[in-house]
Image (tube, rainbow, N blue to C red):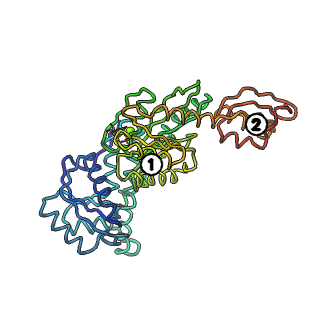
């Protein structure tokens, strides 16, 4: 198996450059970046801030700041400069020239953590795809500039040839990776289809990284997944059947966490992993209330769900780590303010009964009894019913296919126009 490489050598020291719009975000932004550094094995030396609502075109940060960072980086003997944003190829080159040091951006840092964490073949393939698709436009932008300088046809210098071949190599590798990911994805699709044969809804645990998703999964499913304070401890999804009160059950998936400004390349490359969320019937949104910025984190999760096309899913908001909140009114207010929410401690188990009850209600709500007469021209719907619920009866009648089934709501919606009253059967 090919091992994904980490681009940042161990124990490199960095100057952090934090660029954000509001000073109220400073602490959160900096703490988060330091957490990411730790996870990537980077030692943060000093932080330089710039208040910006939009990065500068050529150098990302202002000219004065470039000079300041160059001096600081030299003074503290940093190995590289870490920019908390997504830096273009040209910006990176300009900054590296100005600093005389390597420049790494937030996206690269996150990709690096993912590379370190990847354990399964699918994870490794997806990380490599994310890294290469991140690199590609950088190769392109340098190439374009070079090409413009050179002008017309028949001017193929050695440098240009190198760039061209690099680009082709990257392209070839990207398409090969996509092919391999597709193969792994088919296995996952088959597993999912297999589970769909059961009349149990699917739920995914989503949330900001380190919110306590895996701790909750371990508590609910008896798994022994890695739960760690470092960001992105989980990369690969795990699915288990969970028994609920009164004989109900569901499939529950723990998956990769989200973060503010999750790199788009990562989201695209991790499509197949993240599909577990898009195929869910509902989501448990775990929110870490011990983090002072939990509201910002919540918004970031909602934004990511939107990107995935999963924003409309039924959601139970799970306020986690309430063992860190001693004031009972704060706890009560949280649950009162947010619809369909519970407060728990995944660590101590407090509030789990409330959560199980909320989940049971959700599952009951999802499985509804349907009687329908489906025209033969729509017979593929019957197959879908097997995949999305429990089929009790199918009868091929002259006037159409008679069906009795317990189905998740999405499927009930599709059958609504063919639904019939019990009396007419
Ligand atoms: N105090 C407290 N800590 C918790 C609770 N639940 C989880 N934690 C801690 O929070 C940290 C992160 O927990 P994880 O379960 O790994 O979080 P995650 O959401 O799976 O994180 P990633 O997979 O990295 O995105 C760990 O150090 C847990 O021990 C809780 O209810 N209370
Ligand atoms: Mg986890």
Q: Residue at x 36, y 34 (%)?
A: 347
Residue 82 in percent (x, y) is at 26, 58
Mark 1: C-beta under 8 Å from nearest atom of ligand 1: no
Q: Is residue 121 visible?
A: no
State which image quarter holds ligand 2: top left
Q: Secondary structure at mark 2?
A: loop
- Image height check: is 103 above or below 181? below
Residue 324 occupies quadrant: top left
- Image height check: is 285 above or below 72? above
**375 on left or right of 145:** right
Foreground of the two, 411 or 25: 25
Q: Residue at x 30, y 43 (%)?
A: 230
Q: Quadrant of the C terminus?
A: top right
Instruction: Return the residue at label 2.
Output: 379
- Image height check: is 161 above or below 108? below
Q: Residue at x 16, y 58 (%)?
A: 78
Q: Are marks 2 and 1 in contact (CB under 8 Å)?
A: no
Residue 182 in percent (x, y) is at 50, 41
Q: Residue at x 43, y 55 (%)?
A: 264
Q: Secondary structure at mark 1?
A: helix
Instruction: Return the residue at label 1.
Output: 269
Q: CA distance from mark 2 to mark 1?
A: 35 Å
Local crowd size for mark 1, using a 10 Å CA cut-off: few (<14), some (14–19), many (≥20): many
Label disc, if present, on residue 313 of the rendered structure: none
Local crowd size for mark 2, using a 10 Å CA cut-off: few (<14), some (14–19), many (≥20): few
Residue 312 in percent (x, y) is at 58, 49
Residue 173 in percent (x, y) is at 41, 48
Total marks in image: 2
Q: Is residue 322 visible?
A: yes
**422 on left or right of 35:** right
Sequence-first tag of 2 and 1: 1
């Amino acid at each position: 198996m090919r091992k994904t490489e980490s681009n940042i050598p161990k124990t490199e020291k960095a100057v952090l450059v934090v660029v954000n719009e509001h000073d109220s975000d400073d602490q959160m932004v900096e703490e988060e970046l330091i957490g990411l550094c730790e996870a990537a094995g980077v030692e943060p030396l000093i932080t330089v801030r710039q208040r910006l609502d939009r990065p500068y075109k050529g150098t990302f940060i202002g000219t004065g700041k470039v000079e300041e960072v160059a001096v600081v980086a030299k003074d503290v003997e940093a190995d590289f400069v870490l920019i908390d944003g997504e830096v273009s190829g040209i910006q990176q080159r300009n900054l590296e020239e100005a600093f005389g040091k390597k420049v790494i951006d937030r996206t690269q840092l996150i990709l690096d953590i993912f590379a370190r964490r990847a354990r399964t073949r699918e994870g490794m393939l997806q990380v490599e795809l994310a890294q290469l698709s991140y690199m590609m436009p950088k190769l392109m932008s340098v190439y374009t500039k070079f090409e413009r300088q050179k002008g017309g046809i028949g001017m193929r210098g050695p440098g240009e040839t190198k760039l061209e071949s690099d680009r082709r190599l990257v392209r070839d590798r990207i398409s090969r990776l996509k092919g391999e990911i597709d193969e792994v994805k088919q296995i996952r699709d088959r597993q999912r289809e297999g589970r769909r044969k059961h009349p149990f809804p699917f739920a995914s645990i989503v949330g900001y990284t380190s919110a306590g998703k895996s701790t909750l999964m371990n508590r609910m499913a008896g798994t022994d997944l890695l739960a760690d304070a470092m960001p992105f401890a989980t990369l690969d999804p795990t699915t288990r059947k969970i028994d609920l009160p009164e004989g109900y059950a569901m499939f529950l998936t723990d998956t990769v966490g989200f973060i503010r400004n999750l790199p788009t390349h990562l989201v695209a490359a991790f499509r197949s992993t993240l599909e577990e969320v898009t195929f869910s019937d509902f989501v448990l949104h775990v929110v870490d209330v011990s983090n002072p910025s939990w509201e910002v984190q919540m918004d970031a999760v909602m934004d990511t769900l939107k990107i995935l096309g999963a924003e409309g899913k039924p959601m139970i908001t799970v306020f986690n780590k309430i063992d860190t909140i001693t004031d009972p009114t704060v706890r009560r207010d949280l649950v009162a303010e947010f619809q369909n929410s519970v407060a728990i401690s995944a660590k101590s188990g407090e509030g789990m009964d409330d959560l199980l009850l909320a989940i049971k209600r959700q599952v009951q709500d999802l499985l509804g009894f349907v009687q329908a007469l489906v025209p033969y021209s729509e017979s593929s719907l019957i197959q879908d019913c097997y995949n999305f619920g429990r089929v009790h009866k199918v009868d091929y009648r002259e006037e159409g296919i008679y069906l009795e089934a317990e189905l998740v709501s999405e499927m009930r919606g599709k059958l609504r126009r063919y639904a019939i009253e019990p009396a007419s059967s």
